[in-house]
Image: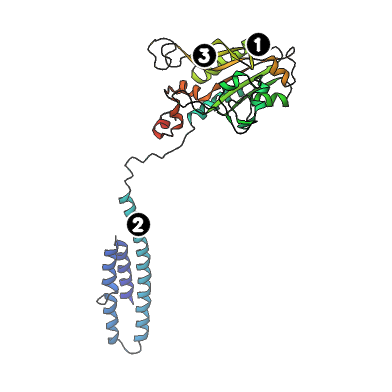
Amino acid sequence: MNDLERLQMRFEAAVQAARDETALEEVRAAFLGRSGEINAIRRSIGRLAPADRPSAGKAINDTVERMETVLGERQTVLAALDVQRKLEERIDVTFPATQPQVGSIHPVRRVIEDACAYFERHGFAVVLGPEVEPAYYNFDALNIPEGHPAREALDSFWIDDTLLLRPHTSPMQIRTMQLHKPPIAIVAPGKCYRRDAVDARHLFQFHQIEGLLVAEGIHFGHLKGMLAGLCRALYGPYQRVRFRPSFFPFTEPSAEVDTTCPKCQGKTTACSMCGGAGWIELGGAGMVHPNVLREVGYDPEIVSGWAFGFGAERLALARYEVDDIRRFIDSDPDFLEQLA
């Protein structure tokens, strides 16, 4: 029996020394194969006394069972190591990884969010409304009665005789004032639609950001201060604003609003963004017309207010130094990645 124990120990040592399936098969053949050491011992049983043969046969079988168990365990370990080795050979961990394609906020959406965040920091509420509105909210309540030339200038998409896709987000100013008493401080972002010919500066669908402040003692200086702060929040700390006299039916006085060119700051006449003018036009603004205040039940002798409306794409053109508004809707990944 001592021979079987020594054989078992040599077998286990040989199994642990095997580093692959081929070496392990050689160990199995040497000990458990047809010409292996176990069969040599079995053949020697015939030389034993008849009474000793059963116990000798059982001892050999027990040894074989233990050896097969050890062999199976080592086969499992080597198989796992083989899988790991093949995986390491297939994946070069030193090779630069492929950069994942991660999405980002669209540049126009980012401008809208940054502008709204600026007004929220100053106590304004963000209000959203329907994109299909009655003519009353789009025109009549804004001091643009039927037949007024300004209706044609807005080039609206009419759904029927009374409903249209809103050409501006101004209806939310009327809706908010009808629901709430002053003071009112809101900013209204959203999609707008006009039958404009698509070119480098115009789209038939665009985004607008409008602001409204109505309370006692509000004057034009408050408007200038808020819009100067907005431009500095979007473009940098050295921005200035300029107001040029204009006309809008829903404000009086009215003005077109410009900001210093974010690219050249008016320091060169060869600027590709402003054409050397030093200023970029943003949109319109002014003091809320008394007729609009009366329409919503406010007394213009007690309260006053200002309003403005800027195109978000126009703000983004200046912020990202883009020369064509159509780039924002082309869904060009290379372009959008540059502005991410």
Give the label on residue 339, or none.
none
Disc 3 crowd rating (10 Å Cα; few below 14, some 14-19, many 20+) is many
For the question of whether residue 283 can be seen, the reply is yes
Count the marks: how many?
Answer: 3
Q: Quadrant of residue 120?
A: top right
Residue pictured at 37% horizontal, 83% vertical? 55
Identify which amino acid the numbered label 3 is placed on. Asp
Q: Quadrant of residue 338?
A: top left
Q: Between tags 2 and 3, which lies in front?
A: 3
Residue pictured at 60% horizontal, 12% vertical? 254
Of 160 and 117, the residue lying toward us: 160
Residue 323 lies left or right of residue 109; in this view the side is: left
Of 13 and 148, the residue lying toward us: 148
Give the label on residue 83, or none.
2
Identify which amino acid the numbered label 2 is placed on. Val
Q: Quadrant of the C terminus?
A: top left
Residue 58 lies left or right of residue 239; in this view the side is: left
User: Mark 3 sits on what residue?
Assistant: 258
User: Mark 1 sits on what residue?
Assistant: 219
Q: Quadrant of the N terminus?
A: bottom left
For the question of whether residue 226 can be seen, the reply is no
Cα distance between the residues tagged 2 and 3:
67 Å
Q: Quadrant of residue 26?
A: bottom left
Residue pictured at 61% horizontal, 21% vertical? 211
Mark 1 residue element: loop
- Image position, residue 214 (x, y; %): 68, 18
Mark 2 residue element: helix
Mark 3 residue element: strand
